[in-house]
Amino acid sequence: MATCPRGHSSVATDYCDECGTPINAPVLPTPIAEVASAGGAPPASAAGGQMCPDCSTPRNGRFCEVDGFDFEAQNLPAQQPDGISQTTVTGTPTPLPASPSNGVLRLVVSADRAYHDRMAAIDAPDADSVAFPVFCPERRFALADGQHLLIGRRSRSRGIEPNIDLTGPPEDVGVSHAHAVLMSTPDGAWTIVDLGSSNGTYLNDSTDPLKPNVPTPVKEGDQIHVGAWTTLTIIS
């Protein structure tokens, strides 16, 4: 069994089947979660003894580094808008305050040649080593107010079951198992949060990855890029 640069044990010998990092890549430090807070509060740490209620991982920031659970959201009043049920990341309800409906939105997942080529042009990780698929059918997911959706690849060994499951086939191994979280905000808008993924999360045509663990607003028409060739487009 191989060991990836982040210290994970992996059956695969090319890319880690836990985080997607190339096995032969330089040794990387374990990511330390940073917290984005409107009040400028310092990052929370595992020293506080808080555990993720979904997977029991010690808290190391605002978002659980395994399943994206939002520790700050759990402290909000558990009120639900009429007709909208609580949603989960891995089974535990994530209560959010009532929010106005902005209409039905959907997420379209597709293989994006332009994104793949753009990453290759800047020598991004995995851009050249992960081949663009010959055929990849579109997948569509409905979005609703109050949702907290984990984006990634399923890992039975770690108990990770993403809401937006990019396991494949075909499989983009540049996508981490717990890659990012798409979250509805109390005012009915949406944000995307990279969870310290190995290869980063990109928005629209930018070649600069989003800062890990910092919510970034997204809207209809935006494209969220993950892995080597996967694009998630928000449409109505």
Image (cartoon, helix red, strand yellow):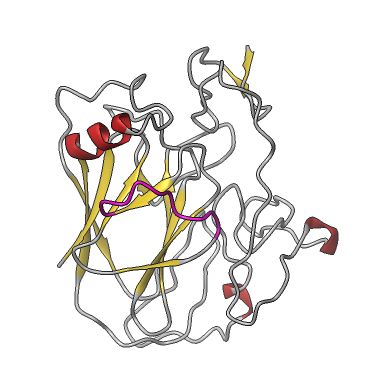
Q: Give yes or no for residue 210 being in the magenta stretch.
A: yes
Magenta segment's dominant SS is loop
Residue 119, given in percent of the width and then of the height, sits at 32, 35
- Magenta span of residues: 204-213
Up-down: is 112 above or below 196?
Answer: above
Residue 100, quarter of picture: bottom left
Q: Residue at x 50, y 87 (%)?
A: 79
Q: Residue furthest front?
A: 122
Q: Nearer the viewer, residue 207 or 224?
A: 207
Residue 16, given in percent of the width and then of the height, sits at 53, 24
Up-down: is 55 above or below 61?
Answer: above
Q: Nearer the viewer, residue 70 or 41?
A: 41
Residue 39, given in percent of the width and then of the height, sits at 63, 82
Q: Residue at x 26, y 33 (%)?
A: 116
Q: Residue at x 66, y 25 (%)?
A: 27
The N terminus: image quadrant: top right
